[in-house]
Image: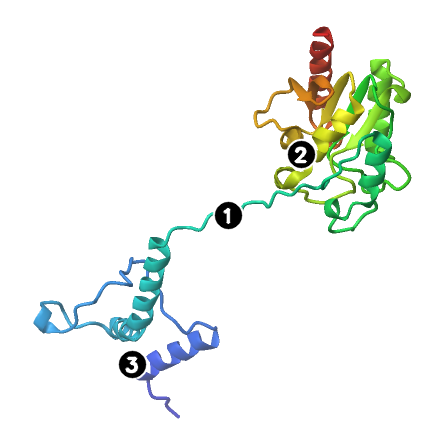
């Protein structure tokens, strides 16, 4: 029995069936295509008759043109409209009419005032120390595991080693945080603008330390200072206090090279006394 040679049409049909079975149902090209331009069609425009693929493209584009035009008009409206400014932080008088007059009253207010802890995700931790301390240490917030006192975890152990190297006993140091509880992803700038900078300033005034060591360059807004200067002085109701600002205790633990820079700043700062 003789098998007839397949015709060209049958060969093409078999080839297309093979490609469809392989999961390829579209053709692709490397030439750039002006998708959004109007394609001239027909001999009247002086262009050759479009291929089947070009005709499908032109038909698809004619269908899409109303939607594209509407999207373009919407984009133009959004582009022309002025961008709305970010909402300003509402500043509040967190103390009310009667701010605490001593550290005992401040600690009681710190542990009970509802305005300074809206989330209540972690327990509040009180500051520790006495007024007139040789050194006040200010950190952004308590450690996550703090429960009985401020800085019970690894940051507290690092601070204890730092103070020992400085020749200071913890009884000579007042340790405080700018926030009453551990606050993940805290926006210190916004919190300061909302009134916490006034709370920090009043806290420093009640402590009236000889020196203030701040662990956290992001605490600048809490100190009422816009510029970033590691060595400075700030005024408070009880007078002036010299301030040194360093990276956070957490950063010092993670990057040993920052410890060397901290000690250089400390030596420089101490020499200015």
In this view, the mark in front (1 or 3): 1
- Residue at x 77%, y 42% (from the top left corner): 182
| Residue 267, label in figure | none
Q: Quadrant of the C terminus?
A: top right
Q: CA distance from mark 1 to mark 3?
A: 68 Å
Task: Name the mark on residue 86.
Answer: 1
Determine whether 190 is above or below 137 in the image.
below
Q: Earlier in the sequence, mark 2 or mark 3?
A: 3
Of callouts 1 and 3, the N-terminal one: 3
In screen coordinates, is 228 left or right of 7?
A: right
Place residue 205 in its image quadrant. top right
Q: Earlier in the sequence, mark 1 or mark 2?
A: 1
Q: Which residue is mark 3?
A: 8
- Residue 207 in percent (x, y) is at 80, 24
Extreme residue toward the bottom, this view: 1
The residue sitting at the front extreme is 97
Question: Could you tell me residue 32's position as x and y percent?
Answer: 29, 57
Residue 71 visible (yes or no): yes
Up-down: is 137 above or below 184?
above
Q: Quadrant of the N terminus?
A: bottom left
Mark 2 to mark 3: distance in Å? 85 Å
- Percent position (x, y) of residue 188? 65, 38
Q: Residue drawn 74% across and 22% down?
A: 213
At mark 3, the secondary structure is: helix
Q: Secondary structure at mark 1?
A: loop
Tell me the quarter of the picture where residue 149 sits: top right
Q: Nearer the viewer, residue 174 or 147?
A: 174
Residue 28 location in percent, x, y?
Answer: 35, 65
- Separation of disc 1 and disc 2 at Cα? 21 Å
Compared across the picture, whether 81 is left or right of 138 comes to left
What label sits on residue 197 in the rendered view? 2
């Amino acid at each position: 029995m003789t098998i007839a040679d397949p015709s060209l049409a049958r060969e093409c049909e078999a080839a297309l069936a093979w490609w469809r079975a392989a999961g390829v149902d579209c053709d692709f090209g490397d030439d750039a295509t002006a998708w959004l331009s109007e394609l001239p069609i027909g001999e009247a425009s002086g262009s050759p008759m479009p291929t089947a693929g070009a005709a499908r493209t032109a038909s698809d584009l004619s269908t899409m043109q109303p939607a594209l035009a509407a999207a373009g008009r919407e984009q133009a409206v959004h582009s022309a409209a002025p961008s709305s400014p970010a909402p300003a932080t509402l500043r509040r008088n967190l103390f009310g009419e009667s701010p605490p007059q001593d550290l005992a009253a401040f600690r009681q207010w710190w542990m009970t005032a509802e305005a300074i802890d809206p989330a209540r995700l972690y327990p509040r931790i009180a500051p520790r120390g006495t007024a007139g301390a040789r050194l006040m240490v200010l950190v952004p917030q308590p450690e996550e595991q703090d429960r009985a006192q401020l800085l019970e975890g690894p940051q507290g152990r690092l601070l204890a080693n730092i103070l020992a190297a400085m020749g200071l006993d913890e009884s000579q140091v007042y340790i405080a945080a700018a926030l009453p509880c551990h606050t993940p992803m805290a926006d210190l700038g916004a919190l300061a603008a909302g009134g916490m900078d006034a709370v920090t300033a009043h806290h420093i005034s009640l402590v009236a330390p000889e020196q203030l060591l701040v662990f956290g360059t992001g605490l600048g807004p809490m100190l009422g200072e816009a510029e970033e200067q590691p060595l400075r002085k700030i005024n408070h109701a009880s007078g002036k206090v010299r301030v040194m600002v360093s990276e956070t205790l957490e950063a010092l633990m993670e990057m040993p090279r920052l410890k060397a820079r901290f000690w250089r700043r400390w030596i420089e700062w101490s020499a200015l006394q």
